[in-house]
Amino acid sequence: MNILESLILGLIEGITEFLPISSTFHLIFASQFLKIKADDFTKFFTVFIQSGAILAVLFLYGKDLKKDFGLVKKTLVAFIPTAGLGAILYKTIKQTFFESYFLMIGLFILVGILFFVFEILVKKKIIIPRKAIRELSYRDAFLVGLFQCFAFLPGVSRAGAVILAMMYLGFRRADSAYFSFILSIPTMFSAGLYDLFKTRNLVITSSENVLLLAIGFLTAFIIAYLAVKWFISYLQKHSLHLFGAYRLVVGLAILRS
């Protein structure tokens, strides 16, 4: 990996981390397109730069969390299932899920179809997304955390899983996206730190690796900051149709290539 490639991957991460289109999916296939060698460092890189995107959320919503300790506690409750299963399935996630390209593409398309299905259910008033984030209960938070675990499968999207779960529970799209941002803080920081511990020798022994990580991290931070603000504004007036269509078009295009 070189500096330009780390910049491109940081850009992709910043755009896709908080949109329900799976940042991991995009990073894996972008790396393939750029012919970046899939070694332990590049796998760590794709996880670590997500922390840059998460830092953007802290800049945007850190003050909100300081004022609402109840939301902090509910976020931690939602994080429990992810933390437990993540620790148990670490090797499987790295060695199996990240290597199964047909599984990734299939899930990428499937979640896009689910977006359309959910919007149909909303239109028919079978699902009524009216509740605000302040109405989130601890039970709701734990259920959302369970659904977030589906994002261990590349192609699902952590944001997509959380948003669909919350819409099913009756929460508005924008509020669902907001909680997906907040829940990303402990989820992605812990994933990055855990990977850093597991592969620390790759970083410590190479100054070039440190530079590549820094570029990817900073780029992801700046772009994610802009993407988060746009996404919240978009969902206040629009449905998930755009992201469903994007998943279908991109997924089918990759299958045909």
Image (cartoon, helix red, strand yellow):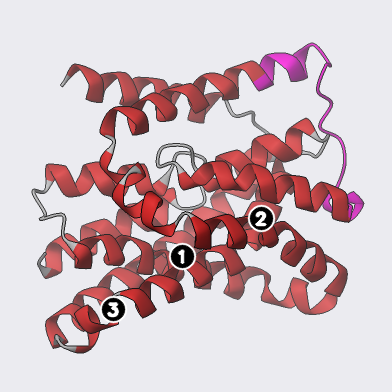
Question: Which of the two residues, 4 or 158, is positioned nearer the viewer here?
Answer: 158
Q: Position of residue 137 (x, y in %)?
A: 89, 52
Q: Amino acid at mark 2?
A: Pro
**Sooner in the amino-acid sequence: mark 1 or mark 2:** 1
Q: Which residue is denoted by mark 1 in the rendering?
A: 53
Instruction: Identify the secondary structure beneath mark 2.
Output: helix
Magenta part of the chain: 118-137
Residue 214 circle label:
3
Question: Which of the two residues, 256 or 193, is positioned nearer the viewer here?
Answer: 193
Circles 1 and 2: CB distance less than 8 Å? no
Quadrant containing the C terminus is top left
Residue 81 circle label:
2
Q: Amino acid at mark 1?
A: Ala
Task: Look at 46% across and 60% down and name the residue there.
Answer: 224
Task: Look at 91% across and 50% down and name the residue there.
Answer: 135
Q: Amino acid at mark 3?
A: Ala
Circles 1 and 3: CB distance less than 8 Å? no
